[in-house]
Amino acid sequence: MKLRQTDLTWHVAGDDVVVLDLDGSVYLKVNGSGRLLWELLTEPRSDADLAAALVAEYDVDEDRAAADVSAFVDDLRTRGLLDE
């Protein structure tokens, strides 16, 4: 999976990623570990890839990382922001 390539624009503003979903006319702000995941999703990634990145960057346990990735990815899916 990776971020949708059409009708989606974003930029880094300080520690945040500011997203404009042109299709839904919705602004989003992603920060913290979400920013890391967002930036990784500019290329095709698996849930396992994303969880491993959280473990490496934030020194969290694998179960917590997997749960956080699942919640983040589910939200992106619900918003229609992923190509799979």
Image: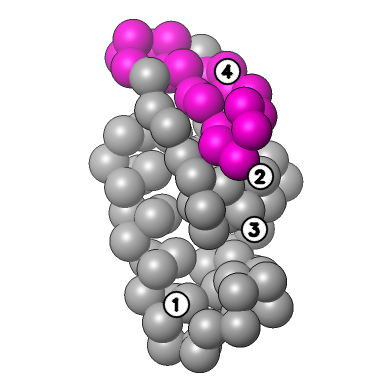
Specify whether residue 84 is in view.
no
> Where is residue 56, by image quadrant?
bottom right
Which dot, 2 or 3, sits closer to the camera?
2
> Which mark is in front, 3 or 4?
4
Task: Assess whether residue 24 is covered by the magenta stretch.
Answer: yes
Residue type pointed to by label 3: Arg
Q: Are marks 2 and 3 in contact (CB under 8 Å)?
A: no
Instruction: Out of 13 and 75, give the one closest to the viewer.
Output: 13
Residue where numbered disc 4 is placed:
9
Q: Secondary structure at mark 4?
A: strand
Image coordinates for residue 16, horizontal then vertical, percent: 55, 37
Q: Secondary structure at mark 2?
A: helix
Residue occupying image coordinates x 64% and y 58%: 45
Q: Which residues are magenta?
A: 8-26
Residue designated by label 2: 39
First in sequence: mark 3 vs mark 4: 4
Instruction: Say which mark, if any, is on residue 66.
Output: 1
Instruction: Specify the amino acid type for callout 2.
Output: Glu
